[in-house]
Image (spheres, grey):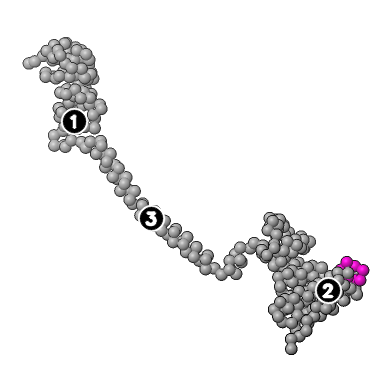
Amino acid sequence: MKPKIYCPYCNLELRWGDKFCGNCGKPIELADSSPSASGEDERARARKEQDPLTCGTCGTVNKRGIEFCRSCGSDLRTHSEFVAEAKPGVPKQVRKDQRSSRREFKAFSSLGTWKPVVALVIIIVAAVLVDRYFSRENIPQQVAQQSNPEPQRPSGANMAAIPQIEDMERQVKANPGDLGMSLQLANFLSDNRFYDKAITYYQSYLQKKPKDNNARVDMGICYKEIGQYDNATREMKQALAYDPSHLFATFNLGIVALDEGKMYMDQGQMDRANELIKESNDWFKKTFALAPTSEVGKRAQQLLSQHSSTQLPSPN
């Protein structure tokens, strides 16, 4: 029986023919030396009981736990992905790079399970957005305005007043019983040429205070500014019904008739234009008679002198 040999560097038991130490990787040059077996440590004996491993570089079977191949000296720690168990009937383990590939494939496969779901969601969202876009394009202008309750914006309206208008509207909404605030908002809208919206607030106010003739005349002026002469005349005459000597209602009835007469004159309807100009002169005369020395009376006299001779002959 051959004597046992040990690594002269780390005292690991070696086999006859080993060229490198399986523990420290040092080349074996004194393979015929036979150090005492008393140097064998418990770790070496434990390794002998382990299942053998096969080097992935040269195929040599090594004990499990050995860090360097006994035959070629390969560092089994850095090439552990090539090491396979050498059990009978069991094939070599799959390399780590192959296992990694399989995990990546599995992850890709699981990715494929939710990708169609995401694609479906994207398609649905896109369809909804397209539908809303075309639906909005086909909404009539009248409906679109109802869905956007911004102040009306006639030509010449003061856009810079919109923030203050919105603030006043919030105050009116928070204090629905404050009629003075509602009237203030209506007047502010009228002064900034938001006539349609001003009319809305005047109407709401006059439902609770119908005999406020000044507010009614102001609403009539808003109707006149947007070309609704019949409504303007009706409101001002209603003010006179409550107060026959209301100076501003009388004067503004002359203004409404004069503006409407000019409209018919531009349209070539001279008969109707002459009727309205005559009517406006009558209202100016009444205004002057009510207060000849007032600023309104003097303005009525001035307009009367300007337009008393503007009647045109009726066409033959």
For the residues labelled 1 and 2, the Cα–Cα distance comes to 117 Å
Q: Is residue 180 visible?
A: yes
| Quarter of the C terminus within the rendering | bottom right
N-terminal-most mark, 2 or 3: 3
Q: Which residue is mark 3?
A: 119
Q: Considering only vertical position in the picture, is 158 above or below 2?
A: below
Q: Look at 20% across and 17% down and name the residue there.
A: 26
Task: Please state which amino acid type lies under the numbered disc 1.
Answer: Gly
Q: Is residue 29 left or right of residue 303?
A: left
Q: Which residue is mark 1?
A: 56
Q: Tell which tag, 1 or 3, sits nearer the viewer.
A: 3
Q: Position of residue 44 (x, y in %)?
A: 21, 19
Q: Residue at x 76, y 85 (%)?
A: 314
Q: Which residues are magenta?
A: 291-297
1 up-or-down from 254: above or below: above
Mark nearer the N terminus (1 vs 3):
1
Q: Nearer the viewer, residue 192 or 309?
A: 309
Badge 1 marks a residue whose secondary structure is: loop
Identify residue for label 2.
Answer: 306
- Whole-angstrom CA distance, mark 1 to mark 3, is 45 Å
- Mark 2 belongs to which amino acid? Gln
